[in-house]
Image: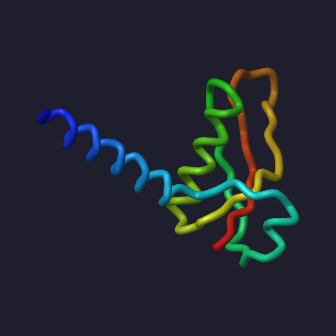
Amino acid sequence: MKLLPVITAALLTAASFSALAATEVNRSEASGLQSMGTVTVSGITGSPEDAISAVQQKAMDEGASHYRIIGIDTPSDSSQQRVNAEIYR
């Protein structure tokens, strides 16, 4: 029975972290938000999802609550990705 409080605490911690994460929005959703500028992450290896996670983290670091992906590309002939996004309050 002592395991139940530990599981409950872990679930609450995970839920509170996801509530603080920046949320991706599309162009129409972004029209009602205040732009904070753009961010770029580059040199990300892995999947496009890894690169998008890096953008989400950078948006949170900048104090943004939302972000919109402007472009994802793989410069040159490398496996590293670059992502540009606009961030919003």
Q: Is residue 65 left or right of residue 82?
A: left
Q: Quadrant of residue 81?
A: top right
Residue 39: x, y in percent? 67, 58
Q: In the picture shown, does residue 37 fall above or below 81?
A: below
Q: In the picture shown, does residue 4 fall above or below 62?
A: above
Q: Quadrant of residue 2?
A: top left
Image quadrant holding the N terminus, namely top left
Image quadrant holding the C terminus, namely bottom right
Q: Is residue 6 left or right of residue 22?
A: left
Q: Is residue 8 left or right of residue 67?
A: left
Residue depicted at 49% across the width and 51% down the height: 18
Residue depicted at 74% across the width and 22% down the height: 78
Q: Nearer the viewer, residue 9 or 40?
A: 9
Residue 66: x, y in percent? 65, 63
Residue 20: x, y in percent? 48, 60
Name the colour scheme: rainbow
Residue depicted at 79% across the width and 67% down the height: 30
